[in-house]
Each structure stands twice: as structure tokens, then as C-alpha cells.
Image: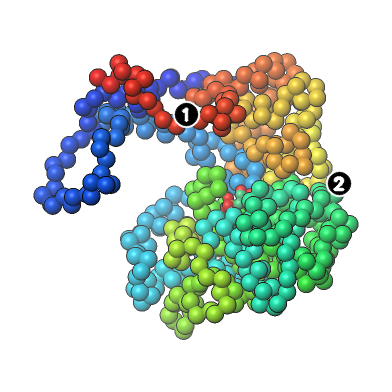
């Protein structure tokens, strides 16, 4: 595995370059139905210029693209913070069961009892995992959960007649935290991390006051460290009458072991697409349910699933609710997959987190002699190394390491985040990787450190054997080429 993979991607033409005027993938007979006339104001004057290809060419185009894609199903994907774990295939069968798949969002409750029961059970399991009693399933992503949580805080304080305008986040916070704070109309205050990677309690004490609405924190943090002072942190906020929001993106480390509610958090979001397994790319698609303490329950979004005896129904009768945050009852297919995942583990769900933590600590122990380790502690489900030693000695950056890993058939870890660590490499193996795969990663990372000393150009020029070489990222961002101009290639137009 520490050999470069040979290039399996000969240059393939663009779909536009495959195009020849008049070619078609298929010509189904026109249905014998009236074609409604479109008003001329909205009708195109000239037909759009689209690629014109035969069906085999079309299939080849998409198959080539699919072949070039890298995902958890192709190889190791240790993308810190994103929890890219295996998605059991049976989930797709279950989400595709006709009773779930064909359910209409406007179906009356009586005709959707199975789906409502599943949602109710999911709410109950999530409540137990968080250690908080009430759950809404509506938000469709972690970031939307954050916004929902902040709206709940606002409604809660407004109801009490308190004016509080500031939310505190950590300097290690994920970018969505400050973004959500700003979107929710709060002022943002940042608290520093101390030398052990915990929230700096002295800094915190100086920043919390009667204007503070709450804290937004992920624990374990984006450094992969469990905050050792979390009970003191909770006391500081609660003594000031403020609330604690738990960004549950890192819940994969603690399920069945510790509960945010017991740590003192009042509002929690889960990233169903990380902790409870969903196919997801950067940022979703997924589910970001939110759990709250009793005193925040009246403000939760509606509708909520409730149980009346043996019957389940959607309930919108909550006068203090913040309203809907998403269409209908939330991203239902995601609920089916996460429910199936939890039921398959059953009471052994704790093992998921234990193995995730074990895998991360195994990698950490085997890599900390070749990369800098800014916070030398046992980690949780992920950890942050730094390539600054390679940069100092050989001019090799975290970006070079990430790009070279691709030549070894491994997806790069998250880099340059969290911001408090220079040349950061944020590594999250997840619990679904076998030891051999972890060992391959270790070998590749160790080999890269050798290459940095002996042949730094290999890293500077990487990736060398992937379909796309190193990009000019600034140019790609500033001058994106989003259109193909057929008229610049008359020979192809036919
Ligand atoms: C720590 C943390 N918080 C929040 C989020 C946002 O979650 P989502 O991508 O579901 O919006 C992420 C996503 O990566 C995260 O890692």
C-alpha cells in the first residue's frame, strides 16, 4: 500500500467534447397526450445548447466520473470532524420500503402509523442518549440544529422578559457555530483554549455576565479532547442564568458513555449523518435533531410526534413554539437509516464509541513520533497532529501531506482546522475500520515523513497519479469556468 498507485484514469473527454450535432441517447415515442401551450413570455426563443451524445457515450461519461470519485466505499477516509463511517447497505433497503418511500407528506396520521411510530421511537432513543427529555426531529443538518437551538434560547429569554444578546463559542469552534450565532442575531464572543486543550476558565469567567445568553460548545472539542473542566464551565453559565448548547457533531466519541444532559448542557443537536450513519458529503444531506431540557420544551418546533395510548400523531398545539424550521416533519429517509443503525447495535451502541476512541488512540500512538502533537493527551474519536515539524525542517506543509496521501489511495484528513493549531492534520478513523487499514494509513503517513526529508518534490508535486493534479485553488475560486462555449470549438459541433 505504501507504493504509489498506478494511474487508472486516462484523460477522458468532456461530455461537451463527446457531443455531435443530432446524436441522441434515445427517442421514446411521443405520448398521445395534449401538450399544454407555454405562454410566449416564458418560452425560449432558441433551444438550449446541450451535449448531444449516444446512450453508450452517455453511460461512459457518467461511469468514468463515478470511477474517479473517492468515497468511504473506495478507501480509507479519515476526514476529521466529518465522521465518514460505513453506511450499512440494509439501510437503503429499509428506507426504500414502499410504506416509507411512497408515503405522502400530507398523509393523514391514521395512514402513517408505522412512520410516526418510528419517529417517536427515534425521538425517545435520542432523548435517552442526550440525557434530555424532549426532542424535535425537524432540522436537516447540524448547522440547522444550531440555528434552531439559538432560536429556542431567544424564545426562552423573551418569555422570561430577559434581554441577553451574546453567545460565547470556543476558539476551536467549527465555522458553523459563529455563523449560526450571527444568523440568529446574537453577538459573538470567543473564549480561548488553555495549554491542555480545555476551555480557559479564567478567560471564560471574565466574559460571562448578565448579557450572556449562552455557550455553544462541542465536547469532545475539534481538537478531539474531552473538556476536563466541563462541570465548572456549566456552573459558570448556569450561575449567570445563561444556557449551554452542545454541538453534537462529535457525539460519536461518547454515545452510551457520557451524556451532554448530565454534563449540564440544556440544548443538544445530533448530526444523524455522522453518528448514526448516513451517506453524506461535506455538510450533509442529513438530520440535525435537537434535544432540550423541560424548561425549553414549550418552544420546540412543531409539529412533534406524540403518543396517545396506542396511537401516534403529529401535534402542533404548542402556543409558544418557534414554529417550523423545515418542511413537514423533517428528513424522513434519514430517520429510517439512523433508527435502523441504532436498533442494529441495540444496547451495545456504547461499543461504537469505544472502538472509535480506540482506533483514534491507536493511530495517535503510532504517529506522534513523526508528526508534532500539540496537545499530548489521550484523544477521543479524533486527534490533531501538526506538520509544522516537516515545514520547519523541509518546507513541507499540511497541504503537501494531504495531497501526497491521495497518491497512496487514502483520502486526506481535514487540514488547517482547528485554527488554533498551525499546519493542522485532523484525523478521524471511525469505528468501522479494521486494524489492517489503520496500519496502512500509519505506514503511508510515516513514509510521507521520510519522503519529506529525502524527496520533498514528491510531496510538492502531489497528487501525481490522480485524475486531477494540484489545483490553483485561488484561480479556481476567483475565475471559475462554469460554462462550455460550443462556438469556441466549431469542429466538434458538426
Ligand atoms: C464540530 C461541528 N459542528 C457543526 C457541524 C455542522 O454540521 P452539518 O455539516 O451537519 O451542518 C460540523 C460539520 O462538520 C462539525 O464538525
Taking the spot 80% from the left edge, 22% from the top edge, the residue there is 393
In the rendered image, residue 74, in percent from the top left (x then y), is placed at: 50, 36
Q: Find the residue positioned furthest to the front.
A: 41
Tell me if the residue at label 2 has its CB under 8 Å from ligand 1: no
Identify which residue, 64 or 445, lies in the foreground. 64
Tell me the colour scheme of the image: rainbow
Q: Secondary structure at mark 1?
A: loop
Residue at 56%, 31% in the rendered image: 478
In the picture, the quarter occupied by the C terminus is: top left
Disc 2 versus disc 1: distance between alpha carbons? 45 Å
Q: Is residue 241 left or right of residue 428?
A: right
- The numbered mark, 2 or 1, whose residue comes first in the sequence reads 2
- On screen, 177 above or below 308? above
Q: Is residue 208 visible?
A: yes
Q: Residue 428's spot in the image, x, y percent?
A: 65, 43
Instruction: Reply above or below: 454 against 212.
Output: above
Q: Nearer the viewer, mark 2 or mark 1?
A: 1
* Res 486 quadrant in image: top left
Dot 2 alpha-carbon crowd within 10 angstroms: few under 14, some 14 to 19, many 20 or more: few
Whether residue 38 sits left or right of residue 212 in the image: it is left
The residue identified by callout 2 is 195
> What number is the disc on residue 481?
1
Residue at the far right: name it.
202
> Pointers 2 and 1 in contact (CB under 8 A)?
no
Query: Which of the 4 quarters of the picture holds residue 226?
Result: bottom right
Give me the residue at 73% from left, 41% from top. Answer: 419
Q: Nearer the viewer, residue 300 or 446?
A: 300
Amino acid at each position: 500500500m505504501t507504493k504509489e498507485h498506478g494511474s487508472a484514469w486516462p484523460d477522458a473527454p468532456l461530455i461537451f467534447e463527446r457531443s455531435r450535432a443530432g446524436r441522441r441517447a434515445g427517442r421514446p415515442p411521443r405520448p398521445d397526450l395534449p401538450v399544454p401551450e407555454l405562454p410566449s413570455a416564458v418560452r425560449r426563443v432558441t433551444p438550449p445548447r446541450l451535449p448531444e451524445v449516444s446512450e453508450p457515450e452517455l453511460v461512459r461519461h457518467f461511469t468514468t466520473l463515478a470511477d474517479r470519485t473517492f468515497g468511504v466505499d473506495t478507501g480509507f477516509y479519515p476526514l476529521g470532524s466529518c465522521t465518514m463511517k460505513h453506511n450499512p447497505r440494509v439501510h437503503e433497503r429499509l428506507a426504500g420500503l414502499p410504506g416509507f418511500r411512497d408515503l405522502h407528506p400530507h398523509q393523514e396520521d391514521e395512514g402513517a402509523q408505522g412512520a410516526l411510530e418510528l419517529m417517536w421511537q427515534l425521538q425517545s432513543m435520542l432523548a435517552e442518549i442526550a440525557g434530555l427529555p424532549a426532542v424535535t426531529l425537524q432540522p436537516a443538518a447540524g448547522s440547522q440544529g444550531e440555528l434552531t437551538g439559538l432560536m429556542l434560547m431567544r424564545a426562552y429569554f423573551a418569555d422570561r422578559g430577559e434581554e441577553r444578546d451574546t453567545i460565547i463559542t470556543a476558539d476551536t469552534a467549527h465555522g458553523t457555530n459563529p455563523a449560526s450565532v450571527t444568523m440568529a442575531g446574537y453577538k459573538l464572543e470567543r473564549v480561548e483554549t488553555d495549554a491542555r486543550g480545555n476551555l480557559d476558565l479564567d478567560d471564560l469567567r471574565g466574559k460571562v455576565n448578565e448579557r450572556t445568553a449562552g455557550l455553544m460548545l462541542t465536547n469532545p472539542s475539534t481538537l478531539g479532547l474531552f473538556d476536563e473542566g466541563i462541570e465548572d464551565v456549566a456552573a459558570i453559565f448556569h450561575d449567570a442564568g445563561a444556557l449551554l448548547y452542545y454541538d453534537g457533531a462529535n457525539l460519536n466519541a461518547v454515545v452510551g458513555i457520557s451524556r451532554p444532559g448530565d454534563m449540564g448542557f440544556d440544548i443538544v443537536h445530533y448530526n444523524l449523518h455522522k453518528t448514526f450513519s448516513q451517506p453524506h458529503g461535506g455538510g450533509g444531506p442529513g438530520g440535525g435533531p435537537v434535544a432540550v431540557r423541560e424548561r425549553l420544551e414549550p418552544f420546540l418546533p412543531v409539529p412533534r410526534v406524540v403518543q396517545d395510548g396506542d396511537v401516534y400523531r403529529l401535534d402542533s398545539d404548542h402556543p409558544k413554539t418557534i414554529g417550523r424550521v423545515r418542511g413537514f416533519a423533517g428528513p424522513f429517509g434519514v430517520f429510517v437509516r439512523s433508527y435502523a443503525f441504532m436498533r442494529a447495535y441495540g444496547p451495545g451502541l456504547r461499543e461504537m464509541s469505544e472502538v472509535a476512541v480506540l482506533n483514534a488512540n491507536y493511530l495517535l500512538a503510532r504517529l506522534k513520533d513523526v508528526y508534532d502533537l500539540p496537545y499530548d493527551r489521550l484523544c477521543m474519536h479524533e486527534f490533531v497532529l501538526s506538520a509544522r515539524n516537516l515545514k520547519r525542517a523541509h518546507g513541507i506543509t499540511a497541504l503537501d501531506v494531504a495531497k501526497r496521501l491521495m497518491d497512496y489511495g487514502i483520502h486526506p484528513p481535514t487540514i488547517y482546522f482547528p485554527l488554533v493549531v498551525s499546519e493542522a492534520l485532523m484525523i478521524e478513523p471511525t469505528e468501522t475500520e479494521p486494524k489492517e487499514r489503520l496500519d496502512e494509513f500509519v505506514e503511508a503517513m510515516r513514509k510521507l515523513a521520510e519522503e519529506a526529508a529525502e524527496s520533498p518534490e514528491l510531496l510538492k508535486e502531489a497528487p501525481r497519479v490522480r485524475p486531477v493534479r494540484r489545483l490553483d485553488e485561488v484561480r479556481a475560486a476567483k475565475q471559475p469556468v462554469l460554462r462550455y462555449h460550443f462556438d469556441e470549438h466549431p469542429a466538434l459541433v458538426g
